[in-house]
Amino acid sequence: MSFDPVHKIIPAFVTGEISQQKADQLLEQTKEVNDGSLHVFFSDQRPQYREAILKSFGQWVQPERKGTRGRFPKPRLEPLEDLLYAQVVKHRRKGRVVKITEKVVFGTQEALQAYLERSPVSRRINTAFVERQNNTMRHHNRRFTRKTLGFSKDDYWLERQVHLSVAYYHFCLPHGGLREEIFPPIPTKGSGSPKKWRQVTPMMSAEVTDHVWTLQELLTY
């Protein structure tokens, strides 16, 4: 899946084994819901993501012919000037991670550093946000619990279960990292403490909705 760490949103996901086709599908779906501002990607070192990002967020360029005769070179895909993509590379020894390095695939180190300095969520290249979201997904969706009878027997039903789980996460489940401080705090009845925080779901953060949905509201929408 792809993950937006600012609004805690899952823009897209695909089910099945990791392949170039699945990676292409994931980035195509991510592009479909992009408003044009998305141009920075972080991932692990899986080789499929480079080509997938280039296909969805690159541009076709016609190279110049070196001489005055002969055929023109074939058009090729190249990254846009503002496209940034970096990988977190984990070096393993006997199955254990011994070192972690960073690799800039698209863009320059200077442009990437300038972006990180403006980032509201992190000053480092990392995949911690999507890894934490994977843990949240496993916690809330029994289909991802390992070594139980709760797993899906068919990709068809797995995909639909994930759609339901993601919709609940987006609209019904307030995210602790998105809560907003209320000032001044709202008094409560009796001797209770004043209400200091407003609960916010990912879709409230993205201004898709203005309130926390109930499960009934979600299922009858």
Image: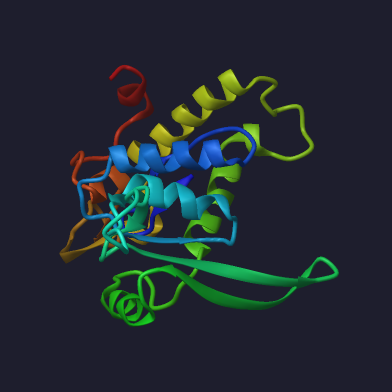
- Residue at position x 38%, y 58% from top? 5
- Residue at position x 81%, y 66% from top? 95
Up/down of 72 relative to 209, above or below: below
Up/down of 173 relative to 131, above or below: above
- Residue at position x 79%, y 37% from top? 147
Quick one: which residue is furthest to the front in this view? 69
Out of 216 and 188, give the one closest to the viewer.
Answer: 216
Task: Report the side of 199 relative to 98 (left or right).
Answer: left
Out of 219 and 63, give the one closest to the viewer.
Answer: 63
- Residue at position x 26%, y 59% from top? 68
State how the image is colored.
Answer: rainbow
Image spot of residue 24 (x, y percent): 46, 40
Image spot of residue 100 (x, y percent): 62, 76
* Tally of marks: 0
Image spot of residue 87 (x, y percent): 51, 66
Quick one: which residue is furthest to the right in this view? 94
Task: Report the side of 115 relative to 14 (left or right).
Answer: left
Image spot of residue 45 (x, y percent): 59, 61
| Quarter containing the C terminus | top left
Q: Specify the quadrant of the image occupied by residue 217.
A: top left
Out of 19 and 213, give the one closest to the viewer.
Answer: 19
Up/down of 176 relative to 123, above or below: above
